[in-house]
Image (spheres, rainbow, N blue to C red):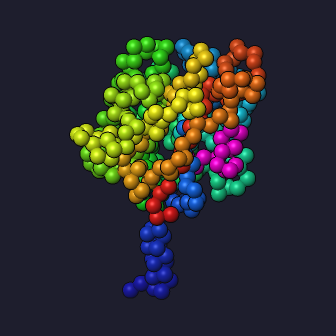
Amino acid sequence: MLTPLLRICGLALLALSLALPAPGCAYRNPPQPEDGYLFCFWNAENLFDDRDDQRSGADADFDAWFAKNKADRELKYAHLSEALLALNAGKGPDIIALVEVESLRAAELLRDELNRRLKDESLHYTHVLMKELHAGRHIAPAVLTRLPVVANRTQLLGNRQRILEGHVTVNGHDLVLLVTHWTSRVSDADGGQRAKYGDQVYGAFKAMYKRNPAVDLLVCGDFNDTPADASVVKHLHATGDLARVRQPDGDPYLFNLFADRDPGEYGTHSYRGKWYIFDQIVVSPALLDGTGWSIVPGSLQTVHSTAQPRDRHKRPWRFGGPQDKMERGYSDHFPVTVRLKVAGG
């Protein structure tokens, strides 16, 4: 027969086990702000860490530069952090999706710099979701967030593609993130590789949708194509036609929040005097139905606060490379943001 002390200990252990989260899932479930959570995607432009990994090709200069030049490296992290923490009333985005991140260490260095500047520890970024790439350039996707995650579901899709799948779960509702960086127009002039990115992402969505039509999926990234290009419209099946998304006539469609937007207002990248909406946010039908996770209507923005202050065209103020002698900015792309709400908060 159990003694009273052992009985009490046993009950305490049982209560603790019931309170613990599922494996891989964070425990803290922060209160939802009245206006919802802020999601941000940003191409961070060659964010390398403080270690010389002897990278080759286009990565070699950035790898050595950031490892050996502490002042420039710290300036890069400071500028990114300043810009991000200027958002969301000084709290920074609740979910930050990035591309062009060299390594897990680079993502963690940015997290640490953000947290150092956040005096309220309840706002600290507690999770980094990332899988390092070992094919082509070392410029991978990553996610930083203060919200609960299911870390053990983080994975890369495709053999050599920059597509990161991550899961953020609040109030029992799972938000699937696909953070992507499609092939450049320089190395893929005819768009064939970008079409493959569209196919890969759409295939992943279609498989999830087949299992669960109510899947809350958000696709974001630097597509290096516009919302009207074939890789996005025909291969990703992303459209601005709400009726088609809500009532598909066959295969499911994704809704592109940037479809039909004016590049002059929403452009994220400028090249030879022309604006392009390369950085986009695309969502599954369930993010439009008001249950589980949902997009807050009218909240989509291209953030222009990182524009060059003395540039009459207000283009993104890039940080540049090791040979540049200019005053350094942030990135050659603007961030894009949208607000999300989740039921039950």
- How many marks the image carries: the answer is 0
> Residue at left 54%, top 13%?
57
Locate residue 61 relative to residue 207 in the image: left or right. Answer: right
Please determine whether, in this image, residue 291 is positioned above or below residue 239. below
What residue is at 59 percent from the left and 14 percent from the top? 272
Magenta run includes residue 216 = no
**Rendered-image quadrant of the N terminus:** bottom left
Query: In this orientation, which residue lies closer to the viewer: 197 or 54?
Result: 197
Asked whether the viewer can see residue 30, the reply is no
Q: Residue at x 50, y 55 (%)?
A: 341
* Rendered view: 58 above or below 251: above
**Residue 311: x %, y % from top left:** 72, 23
Question: Does residue 203 appear to the left or right of 153 in the view shown?
Answer: left
Residue shown at 67%/23% (left/top)?
A: 313
Side of 116 where 285 appears, left or right: left
Quarter-of-image position of residue 18: bottom left
Look at the magenta stretch and give its main secondary structure.
Answer: loop
Q: Nearer the viewer, residue 311 or 117?
A: 311
Residue 11 percent coordinates (x, y)? 45, 78
Is residue 86 on the magenta stretch? yes
Question: Measured from the top left, where is residue 280 in percent x and y?
Answer: 49, 34
Q: Is residue 233 visible?
A: yes
Residue 66: % across, % down: 67, 24
- Using the image, determine if residue 25 lies above or below residue 160: below
Magenta extent: 82-95
Q: Nearer the viewer, residue 225 or 248?
A: 248
